[in-house]
Amino acid sequence: MTKLIIVRHGNTFNKGEIVTRVGGRTDLPLVESGVLQATKAGELLKSKNIKIEVVYAAPLKRTMQTAEGILRALGKDNLPIESLSDFTEIDYGVDENKPESEVLARLGEKALQDWSEKAIVPDGWNVNPEEIIQNWIRWSERISSSGKNTLIVSSNGIIRFAPYITGDFEKFSKEHDIKVSTGAICIFEYQSNILPGKWVYVDWNIK
């Protein structure tokens, strides 16, 4: 069955550094631990015998470097990585690249909790949830039609909307933490034997 493998990029901060809310306008590279996470993600996919045939990554250093690390671990360095802006991290607006303590002080715990648990966008962020959802649905349809196992490397703000391809995001978000960890893997499988065909999740947020 056709698989969609989604990986969040690796770490962009070293231990002890001030962590900021890194969005689509902040292009940070991976730090050493992030490079290792990419390698580990590739090794995990290899252990699962998942054959990657197509690769997309957001056009940011951290996502492209993660995709490259995964492919090296899989022994597929020659597989092209297509840069795709549809999967670029969201724009955190006034909170872009601000320390998390400042973001919390401005928005409050409830707004950040709603974002983490329900993907409700806080005030001041430049995000169009419907556009992100439609991008995931459109690409999932394209992937299911191609029949090729596809890897997509993106960021936390984008990936949390991916479960919409299952047709029941509300149920999914009640059962799972939609915030995906750095370097973690999510796997969906297209079940064509069900009419109409349906995407189901196999793994979510695994490392």
Image (cartoon, rainbow, N blue to C red):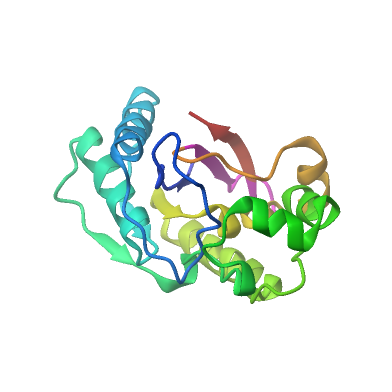
Q: Position of residue 127 (x, y in %)?
A: 65, 73
Would you say residue 95 sits in the magenta stretch? Answer: no
Q: Position of residue 20 (x, y in %)?
A: 53, 54
- Is residue 168 something one can see in this rendering? no
Residue farthest to the top, as pictured? 47
The residue shown at (62%, 40%) is: 201
Number of numbered discs on residues: 0
Q: Position of residue 40 (x, y in %)?
A: 34, 29
Q: Nearer the viewer, residue 69 or 109?
A: 109
Q: Nearer the viewer, residue 149 or 193?
A: 149
The residue shown at (48%, 68%) is: 24
Span of residues in magenta: 184-199
The residue shown at (49%, 37%) is: 184
Residue farthest to the right, as pictured? 110
Horizontal placement of 189 versus 197: left or right? left
Q: Nearer the viewer, residue 35 or 85?
A: 35
The residue shown at (64%, 43%) is: 200
Q: Is residue 42 above or below residue 100?
A: above
